[in-house]
Image (cartoon, rainbow, N blue to C red):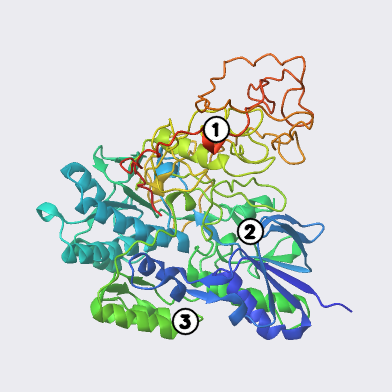
Amino acid sequence: MSRPRIVIVGAGFAGYRTARELSRTARDKAEITLLNPTDHFLYLPLLPQVAAGVLEPRRVTVSLSGTLPRVRLVLGEAGHVDLDGRTVHYTDPEGGAGTLEYDRLVVAAGSVNKLLPVPGVAEHAHGFRGLPEALYLRDHVTRQLELAASCEDPATRAARCTFVVVGAGYTGTEVAAHGQLFTDAQVRRHPLREGLRPRWLLLDVAPRVLPELGERISRTAGRVLRQRGVDVRMGTSVKEATHGGVLLTDGEYVETRTLVWCVGVRPDPLVASLELPMERGRLLVDPHLQVPGRPEVFACGDAAAVPDLEKPGEYTPMTAQHAWRQGKVCARNVAASLGAGERQAYRHRDLGFVVDLGGAKAAANPLGFAMSGPLAGAVTRGYHLAAMPGNRVRVAADWLLDAVLPRQAVQLGLVRSWSVPLDTDSPELPRVPGEGRERGPGNRGGGQPGNGGQGDDRTEATRRRAVSESAKNQPGPEGPEPARNQPGGEPAKNQPGGEPAKNQPGGEPGKGQPGGEPVRSRGRALGAVVEGDAEWSGVAGPFLDAETPGPAGSAEIEPSGPGETVTGDEGSSPAEPHSGPGGGPSRGPAEPRADREPPGPEAGSEPPGPVRRPDTAAEPRADREPPGPAGAGPGTEQSGQAGHRTGPEPPGPVRSSDLPSASPGPTDLSDQSDRGER
């Protein structure tokens, strides 16, 4: 008899704890499969320290295969769940589709950035829910300070040194606190002109910082932030975001290149696709974490609305503390449904909260005892070390080194702005150009590449053109438009049916060739995008159709409160597919006729000059077939379709003896404008 199959979707706090407990209790009694986009568990509470350079990225990750024995790891994103057929369809990291069958399903997909209908936010803001976003923010902040140091314009210099954080909950407060320390340390080592100091703004429509916690902890956190120099503005948020700054709800316009969106989270969109009873965007479950009417389906963590037995009529908030505990209870109840042990209802006791404010400062209330200062800092770090399922020694070592050594303020350029769009279903994965995903069976929707960031100095039109040019270099019969020198695209200038290349016979002499212009070297490979050489950190593309402008904040939501999905359908429109391999005529060169040699230049004549093609196709000669690929009939014009112009065959190769003895012109390096991040 085959063993029962348990599939766990997601390896966040709830999913990881469920898998770990099942690997101990179920052992060899069940086949446990964990489906997750990455091969690690991310300890989110320490993510602000990664952005501030305190911890290295791998310190806050724990290997799934290394810490979950007897659990099969499958890399992929769940896209569709067939509840009747008991199958989960997913997409692996390379785009392949797969299917997992289950007898018990645990939905622990977690949450993603919460969106609000504020104009410009989706294009110019970045969230803080994944490791790529933290790495991008660290590079971006460092880059802005370095650019400000060399900037001549005082207004631009001040804008680059202004950083706006929206949302004064756990994440926003810690990002602003650590960010101010990080930038101050850089400026102390490399002072800015006129004594300029980095400015951090923390905005929220709530009346105080950390509104979800007690008033005493809130006062402590607010006092530490203001003493450190953070401009804390309560009752204020963003009304509109633009490339050059943000318009606040009080009417003030703040020039900035950085907008960090920390207003809260929303359940993963996979939950809504199940078409099961929901509560404020979360999957409704009973106290035993089972879905009513689907006893084989369990849910926990941010994806589940779990009744709070301590507060009848309410549901547990979306916090890591609840997700971690629910994972343990879920594992026991799944095992009990298979005949191992007894199930139990989820009950919790509040153990308190800790907020790391950077350095030796923190605010904490363990077991109800409010504290602040260095003592709270020690309690906070001790709690994190105890809660982490791994890497404790490495984390402690990084903390020790940070206390005695200066931080390395360098930008690695590993994550670009368009890799971490705000509107994405997978903040744990960076996006790549041309990876636009459509929601459907076996695939989850993801943010399109091209989300703009504040770190870019180009206009939006230029950024969109750069995205379009970048998409053209992605081959594929159904994907973006192929490049001119790729199969299925417009014929290259040196191919039959296209305009002759400048350095080819019958074409205009190339730059650097006799009779041509000197080469203007740009230091880039063939096929690279030339237009849009500006900074690639902010390629923009619309992602949100804002319906009603309004303030953004977290007063009306829980600290990590759920919200409605506010997304738009607008995105980078794919180019029209062109014929390619297997889908149309070939673009390869035509074979020479065997009955004659190609015409060549007469002896002693000058090299052939440029051939200017008229706007209309030339009439074919009656005594020969027009050159071009097989299947292309004579007289075919090229007007946006996969056809070829007709015309005389290109002349034969130029003999070396026919060329003048003049040497090529000098190489001009004055046009090097490679300002992009490498």
Of labels 3 and 2, earlier in sequence is 2
Nearer the camera: disc 1 or disc 3: 1
The answer to whether one can see residue 520 in this image is yes
Q: Which circle's residue, 1 or 3, is located before the other in the chain? A: 3
| Of labels 1 and 2, the one closer to you | 1
Residue 391, which numbered label? 3
Residue at (71, 30) in percent of width and height: 597
Q: Amino acid at mark 3?
A: Asn
Q: Secondary structure at mark 2?
A: strand
Q: Horizontal and vertical percent for residue 436? A: 59, 46
Q: Which residue is mark 2?
A: 284
Secondary structure, mark 1, is: loop
Alpha carbon distance from label 1 to label 3 = 58 Å
**Residue at 67% over, 43% down:** 476
- Which residue is the site of mark 1? 501
Q: Position of residue 589 (x, y in %)?
A: 69, 36
Q: Quadrant of residue 400?
A: bottom left
Q: Image quadrant for the C terminus? A: bottom left
Residue 349 position (above or below residue 105): below
